[in-house]
Image (tube, rainbow, N blue to C red):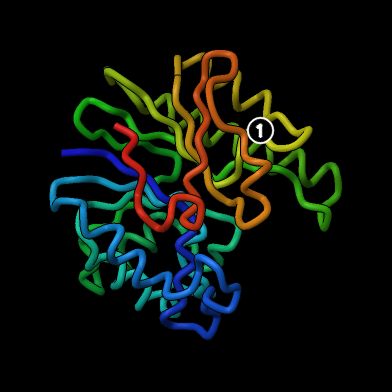
């Protein structure tokens, strides 16, 4: 039994937005994902760190969810900036149940446990130039609170691991409030996605002030889930 993570699957079985057009490692990426997940067992768990489907609604993303559901292991999904299909937890859980999607669960203002490890996290936020400073600050505060709520729900865990879509450290941006929250709950490991292509060179990796950071974007880890515990 093992815990894995991968981000940014960018599936589009129900839409016309395949990532193969970007060439390079994205060519035949769904086949690579199938091969990458083939090493997982049924009792393993994999956290999917956002940007899972290009679908604009749950219905448009259904074939993507079916693809994920057919992959080995249990999956925990959190929100990415391109997950336009994302809805309330109740609606998503109902949709999965109606469509017999049985291996996917939602990480949103909660946590999950796996072999003594508490799985916590949220989307995160780096800011968006289309928003005002006030709007960006509001979203950032909301994401920080969601992280806090997720961590508060982790009780009696031997170990806590945090997962995000956005990086917590990027260029000259440091999400101090989120780092402070992680430090309060003694989090030592943080995984994130979002960065692609040339953006990989900007990824912050390794131990900084007591927290180990690692990027798990699908194209960075060759579409093979990374074992994290």
Q: Is residue 203 left or right of residue 78?
A: right
Q: Position of residue 80 (x, y in %)?
A: 54, 54
Q: Is residue 88 left or right of residue 203?
A: left
* Viewer-side residue, 193 vs 177: 193
Q: Please report the residue visible at 65 percent of the width from the left and 44 percent of the height from the top.
A: 201
Q: Please report the residue visible at 52 percent of the width from the left and 72 percent of the height from the top.
A: 54
Quarter of the image with the N terminus is: top left
Q: Is residue 113 above or below residue 179?
A: below
Is residue 78 visible in the rendered image? The answer is no
Q: Is residue 191 above or below residue 66?
A: above
Q: Please report the residue visible at 25 percent of the width from the left and 74 percent of the height from the top.
A: 99
Q: Position of residue 71 (x, y in %)?
A: 24, 63
Q: Please report the residue visible at 51 percent of the width from the left and 14 percent of the height from the top.
A: 184
**Mark 1 highlights which residue?**
169
Q: Position of residue 179 (x, y in %)?
A: 60, 23
Q: Secondary structure at mark 1?
A: strand
């Amino acid at each position: 039994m093992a815990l894995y993570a991968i981000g940014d699957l960018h599936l589009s079985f129900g839409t016309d937005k395949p990532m193969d057009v970007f060439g390079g490692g994205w060519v035949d990426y769904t086949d690579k994902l199938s091969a990458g997940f083939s090493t997982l067992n049924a009792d393993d768990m994999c956290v999917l760190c956002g940007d899972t489907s290009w679908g604009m609604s749950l219905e448009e993303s259904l074939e993507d969810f079916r693809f994920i559901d057919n992959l080995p292991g249990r999956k925990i999904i959190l929100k990415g900036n391109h997950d336009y299909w994302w809805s309330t937890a109740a609606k998503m859980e109902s949709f999965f149940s109606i469509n017999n999607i049985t291996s996917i669960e939602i990480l949103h203002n909660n946590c999950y446990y796996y072999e003594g490890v508490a799985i916590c996290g949220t989307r995160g936020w780096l800011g968006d130039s289309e928003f005002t400073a006030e709007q960006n600050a509001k979203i950032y505060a909301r994401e920080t609170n969601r992280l806090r709520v997720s961590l508060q729900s982790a009780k009696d865990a031997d170990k806590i691991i945090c997962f995000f879509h956005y990086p917590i450290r990027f260029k000259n941006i440091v999400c101090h409030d989120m780092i402070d929250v992680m430090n309060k709950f003694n989090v030592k490991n943080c995984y994130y996605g979002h960065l692609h292509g040339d953006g990989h060179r900007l990824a912050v990796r390794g131990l900084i002030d007591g927290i180990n950071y690692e990027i798990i974007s699908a194209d960075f880890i060759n579409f093979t889930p990374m074992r994290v515990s």
